Image (cartoon, rainbow, N blue to C red):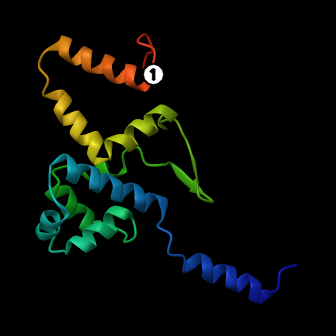
């Protein structure tokens, strides 16, 4: 049986933990994704919100929680509905593990979303959508598949 002081220590450690909450990380990631999609710097976003770029960084990493009024301000500056920040969020969190529900993404989609959240992912997508010729687009896809060692007939999902 655990002693009272051991239980208290566990509670203090859990409450005082500096690990960001998974939902805060998700919302921050969506802020970062939209900001990068718009080609906006952390400094410019901070200026629009009356914050320093360091505060924006903390929001994006999930270290600082985004309050309701700040979330509203972010939705206005980033030109998205508030729901955008919660899209594809884990349904519930239990001991650090996400539990999926009816709208959970498939494993391959998680990798795609993580890639799209990177600078390389955004740059690649921006460049790709500017390619007008369908044959050139197909050639780019075939090239990337060949470089990845993937069979040409492999299909999504």
| 77, above or below 34, in the image | below
Residue closest to the far right:
1
Give residue 67's position: percent from left, percent from top: 32, 69
In the image, 126 versus 99, the foreground residue is 126
| 124, above or below 144, in the image | below
Q: In which quarter of the image is residue 57?
A: bottom left
In the image, 31 versus 146, the foreground residue is 146
Q: In this view, does 83 lie to the left or right of 99?
A: left
Give residue 140's position: percent from left, percent from top: 26, 20
Q: Which residue is drawn at 32% across and 62% down?
A: 60
In the image, 133 versus 44, the foreground residue is 133
| 34, above or below 43, in the image | above
Find disc 1 in the rendering and name its residue: 149
Q: In this view, does 60 lie to the left or right of 45?
A: right
Give residue 40's position: percent from left, percent from top: 14, 55
Q: Quadrant of residue 111?
A: top left
Residue closest to the far front:
147
- Residue 149 visible within the image: yes
| 119, above or below 149, in the image | below
Q: Which residue is drawn at 12% across and 70% down?
A: 47
- Residue 106 visible within the image: no
| Number of numbered discs | 1
Q: Which residue is drawn at 88% across and 78% down?
A: 1
Give residue 13's position: percent from left, percent from top: 61, 80
Local packing at callout 1 (Cα closer than 10 Å; few below 14, some 14-19, many 20+) is few
User: What secondary structure is found at the residue carrying circle 1?
Assistant: loop
């Amino acid at each position: 049986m655990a002693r009272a002081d051991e239980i208290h220590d566990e509670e203090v450690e859990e409450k005082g933990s500096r690990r960001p909450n998974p939902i805060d990380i998700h919302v921050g990631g969506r802020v970062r994704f939209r900001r990068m999609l718009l080609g906006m710097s952390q400094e410019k976003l901070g200026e629009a919100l009356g914050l320093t770029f360091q505060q924006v960084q903390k929001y994006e990493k999930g270290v600082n929680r985004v309050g309701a009024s700040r979330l509203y301000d972010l939705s206005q500056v980033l030109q998205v509905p508030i729901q955008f920040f919660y899209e594809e969020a884990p349904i519930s969190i239990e001991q650090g593990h996400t539990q999926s529900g009816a709208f959970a993404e498939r494993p391959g989609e998680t990798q795609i979303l993580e890639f799209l959240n990177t600078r390389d992912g955004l740059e690649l997508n921006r460049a790709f959508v500017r390619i007008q010729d369908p044959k050139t687009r197909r050639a780019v896809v075939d090239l990337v598949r060949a470089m990845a060692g993937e069979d040409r007939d492999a299909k999504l999902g």
